[in-house]
């Protein structure tokens, strides 16, 4: 099983009081983890919201993260756009639309056959999406 990491999971090692359970899970699974350029954008925004030394430390962490995930950061491209459009249409018909950025992340996961790893269950619990919450769930059996 391979994973698409959401922002709330990927940032845990950089937080002052990051969740030890999630950090341990990330370390175990790091070679099977991917993310989205949308998540990187959210992280870059988070870094820019800080000031001084904290911002410098987080920027260095983000640079190392991007380097470490080289080749495992999926962009929002034409094939993902078509998955998103179909997904958005079906969710709208069902009255279950998602926040736009989450929809882009979900479409990226669907396009690449990845399980979304997030603590944000409520926005991602939709038909056709595979989810895992490392904050509350035990490792799923592959």
Image (cartoon, rainbow, N blue to C red):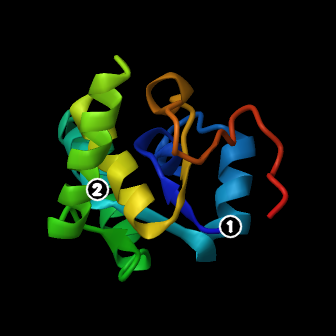
Secondary structure under the numbered disc 1 in the rendered image: helix
Question: On the rendered image, what quadrant is the C terminus found in?
Answer: bottom right
With respect to residue 20, does 27 lie above or below? below
Q: Earlier in the sequence, mark 1 or mark 2?
A: 1
Q: Position of residue 84 (x, y in %)?
A: 25, 49
- Residue 68 is left or right of residue 55, and the answer is right
Residue lying furthest bottom: 71
Q: Nearer the viewer, residue 70 or 14?
A: 70
Residue at the (49%, 32%) spot, across then down:
126
Q: Position of residue 2 (x, y in %)?
A: 60, 68
- Residue 64 is left or right of residue 12, and the answer is left
Q: Nearer the viewer, residue 20 or 117?
A: 117
Viewer can see residue 29: yes
According to the image, label 2 marks what residue? 83
Residue 45: name its quadrant.
top left
- Residue 26 is left or right of residue 61, and the answer is right
In front: label 1 or label 2? 2
Disc 1 crowd rating (10 Å Cα; few below 14, some 14-19, many 20+) is few
Residue 53: name its quadrant.
top left
Secondary structure under the numbered disc 2 in the rendered image: helix
- The numbered dot on residue 29 is 1
Disc 2 crowd rating (10 Å Cα; few below 14, some 14-19, many 20+) is some
Residue at the (35%, 77%) spot, across then down:
67
- Residue 11 is left or right of residue 100, and the answer is right
Residue at the (57%, 33%) spot, across then down:
119
With respect to residue 66, does 57 lie above or below? above
């Amino acid at each position: 099983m391979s994973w698409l990491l959401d922002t709330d999971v990927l940032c845990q090692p950089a937080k002052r009081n990051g969740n030890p359970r999630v950090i341990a899970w990330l370390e175990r699974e790091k070679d099977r983890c991917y993310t989205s350029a949308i998540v990187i954008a959210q992280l870059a925004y988070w870094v820019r919201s800080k000031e001084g030394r904290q911002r410098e430390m987080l920027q260095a962490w983000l640079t190392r993260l991007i380097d470490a995930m080289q080749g495992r950061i999926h962009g929002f491209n034409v094939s993902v756009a078509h998955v998103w459009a179909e997904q958005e249409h079906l969710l709208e018909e069902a009255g279950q639309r998602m926040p736009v950025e989450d929809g882009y992340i979900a479409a990226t996961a669907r396009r690449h056959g990845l399980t979304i790893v997030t603590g944000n269950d409520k926005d991602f619990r939709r038909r056709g999406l595979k989810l895992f919450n490392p904050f509350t769930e035990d490792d799923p059996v592959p």
